[in-house]
Image: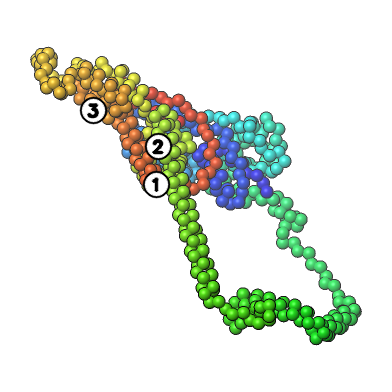
Amino acid sequence: MTRVVVLRPEPGNADTCAKLRGLGLEPLAMPVFTVVPVAWTPPDFGGFDAVLLTSANAVRHGALPDTLKALPVIAVGDATAAAARLAGFNVAVTGTSNVDAAIDAARASGFDRLFHPAGRDRRPTGPDVVACTVYASEALRIGDIMLPRHEDLLVLIHSPRAAHAFAEHVAQAGIDRSRVTIAAISQAAADAAGSGWAALVVAETPTDDALVTIAAKRAIDPDARRGDKRVMSDHVPIERPRARGPRLGVIIILIGLAFIAGSVAMGYALKTMPWFGQRTGLTAAGSTTAAAASGNPDFTPAQPLNANGEQPRVDTAMLATREATLAGQLTALEARTAAVSSDAMAAGGQATRAEGLMVAFAARRAIERGVGLGYIEEQLRLRFGRAQPRPTAAVIQAAHQPVTIEDLRQGLDTIAPQITSTNGTTNDSWLQTVRREFSNLIVLREESMASPMPADRLARARRLLEAGQVEAARAEVERLPGATQASNWMDAARRYIVARKALDILENTALMGQAGQPQPSPIVVTTPVLPPVATSTQTEAPVAVPAP
């Protein structure tokens, strides 16, 4: 059977491998690059008619802002459209061939100016299409993955860049191209792979399902496909039956004579040898016992004899005692079986609860450190996606835009001069400004009340941040005279609070045993993690920082 190799990055690699395993194949996962997010500055979306999405990676790794969801989406491929709908976008047009056809369909629907969140490596898409890099494909080191040198390979290629990388790897490893069949998702990917392969097949439609169909048709024994009967199981040789020999009648006569002689000898032994008759009686008794055990209702077992050859008396009291003892033992065994079953169910529930807690704690630790969730993100969806869909989505979104206590502390220090001063924050006249300044010279308050002075409020907010009370610190900053200058900081603090509340809900769900039991996960290839970018706290335009 031909070995199938999948080159696409995660998480699509695991999906393709799962489809191939469902068809009875054993794929080899070998991603040649991984998708990582890129920091980008959102433009003014007011001048665009729609959003052009050419890859699901823009939705998964691009950290697209919620304001972009107000625009309709032009998607290339069903997979991209499904990812956009899952993220909350409104898909207006779905192209099935390529990006040029999707743009033509958008023009026909009245969408002229398009915003294109794309990858770093892309080709021009024409006029009135503004492209912005939101993710990048970083090459992975694939030299450690050993391809079988003495097997026929069928390689599924999902992009031209993957074709280039695989061709270079084959040249460096010294693999014979005549034993490798290429299945490309498009003609561009096929052209990038080059020539010299055993076969080069292009999918009819640029979808992963089309490549899986090619693999199912071609990943069989080539000898069987050519009709070689040595490898086909329906070739059954026919042998000529032997003819009966002339001595068959003699053999039957000899068997009959031997049976008659044996019967005569047994009758003589029964009459002349008493011990032989007793042994035969015991054998017959054993046979009748076995017949009774087989369930024949007309059978009556023979009673055993005592030393005098008489039938012993039946002790009904002893039989009743034995019956009661056996009944008690059976009851005890049933009780032990029920207890073992109950303990097993309880142990399974406790194990599921412990696994859910471990996943929730791991997610909290990753968010507090400001790093991506990685494989924990898939575990969160599997275990908490049905029981708590909103908190699960909030935690994953918080991991895509991480905010830590240190980020909030540094941001508050940066905007402290702006939020404690009233200069430039109001439209009062000079007379009102002078009155306000004089009114602040003397402040009367109760001794138990906190000071309303901006400097004191700022100091309290810093102390609350040090103690981890972000919600209270946010309330103090909101009462400062320059709170309008801290909109970015307030939004970051709100995301921090929402993420922690969602984590609390997930941990409570795991403690109560409501977390689901995940199905067997596909192969997960670890992707590199980028360092988090500090939360912006200035008054300039916000910068979208995606999760690694």
* Residue at the disc numbered 1: 513
Left or right: 43 as drawn, with respect to 422: right
Q: Residues within 10 Å of mark 2 (few under 14, many from 20)?
A: many
Which residue corresponds to the image point at 65% horizontal and 82% vertical from the top-left?
310
Residue underneath mark 2? 396
| Mark 3 or mark 2, earlier in chain | 2
Q: Where, quadrant-wise, is the C terminus in this rendering?
A: top left
How far apart marks 3 and 2 lie (CA) works out to: 25 Å
Front tag of 3 and 2: 3
Residue occupying the point 22% across, 17% down = 455
Where is residue 501 drawn, in percent x and y?
32, 36
Three-letter code, disc 2? Ile
Q: Residue furthest front?
A: 308
Q: CA distance from mark 3 to mark 1?
A: 35 Å
How far across and down, in percent of the image, does residue 453 sit? Answer: 18, 18
Residue that carries the numbered disc 3 in the rendered image: 475
- The numbered mark, 1 or 2, whose residue comes first in the sequence reads 2
Of the numbered discs 3 and 1, the one sitting upstream in the chain is 3
Q: Residue at x 66, y 34 (%)?
A: 170
Q: Is residue 15 left or right of residue 81?
A: right
Number of the front mark, 3 or 1: 1
Q: Residue 67, can we see it?
A: no
Camera-side residue: 311 or 34?
311
Q: Amino acid at mark 3?
A: Ala
* Mark 1 Cα shell of 10 Å, populated few (<14), some (14-19), many (≥20): some
| Left or right: 417, with 306 as reference point | left
Helix or strand or loop: what does disc 3 sit on? helix
Instruction: Name the residue located 85 percent from the left edge and 81 percent from the top edge.
Output: 258
Is 339 situated above or below 160? below
Kind of element beneath mark 1: loop
